[in-house]
Amino acid sequence: MRKIIVISFVSLDGIMQAPGGPEEDTEGGFKYGGWVEPFGDETFGNIMVKQMESTDLLLGRKTFEIFASYWPNHANDWPGINDVTKYVISGTIQKSDWENSVFLNSLADIENLKKTSGSELKVWGSSELVHLLLEHDMVDELWLKIFPLILGKGKKLFTENSVPAAFTLTESTVATSGVIFANYKRAGKVKTGAIGS
């Protein structure tokens, strides 16, 4: 069974859209693309190197197309990115010139992939795919980078259709920039109770 890890840059109000640059994703009139850049520091860089360690990727179509247009020619900045398998969930594209790209058509394909042996599957960006995985309780870990910003309108990490689930904090770091790096793993069902009882 392969572990699915969702890695996300997220604002205080849950926005995950276009962290990397102004033109990355302007859908819906989003104006704040590149909101991560001002917070880069040594801590941020070290954690990114760790999180970018070579492992297979599971991506949505839009994120895949962004990655495929950039990373094949910048592989020195992400060692192993061209060598790992990139699994892409898409109903519109079925081939790519980027080596080691495999296309999936449905949730059932992801479920079957998860049952195979192999490395963990890291999900970068891919908001629609993340929503699908959360709706079907398929996320094993969340690696969140929480930024001290409110962005208002934009694509959110969580939706009202996410399956209620409990998580345990496994690792955390706070950078001098105020960014909180928090890794969580799945920990059963949500428990409730009355305060003070």
Image: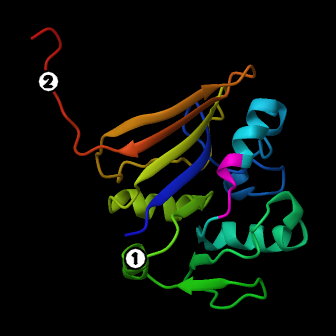
Mark 1 belongs to which amino acid? Leu
Asked if residue 190 is among those painted magenta in the image, a careful observer would answer no
Q: Which residues are magenta?
A: 50-54
Q: Nearer the viewer, residue 10 or 81?
A: 81
Residue beneath label 2, please?
A: 193
Quarter holding residue 189: top left
Depth check: give the residue in front, 171 or 23: 171
Q: Is residue 28 left or right of residue 77?
A: left
Percent x, y of residue 36? 76, 39
Q: Earlier in the sequence, mark 2 or mark 1?
A: 1
Q: Secondary structure at mark 1?
A: helix
Tell me the amino acid under the disc marked 2: Gly
Numbered mark located on residue 107 in the image: 1
Q: Residue furthest bottom?
A: 95
Q: How many marks?
A: 2
Please tell me in which quadrant of the rendered image residue 181 appears: top right
Please tell me whether the stretch drawn in magenta is mainly helix, strand or loop: loop
User: What's the distance in space between the residues labelled 2 and 1, CA to CA?
Assistant: 34 Å
Q: Quadrant of the rendered structure where residue 56 is?
A: bottom right
Left/right placement of residue 137 relative to residue 150 reads left
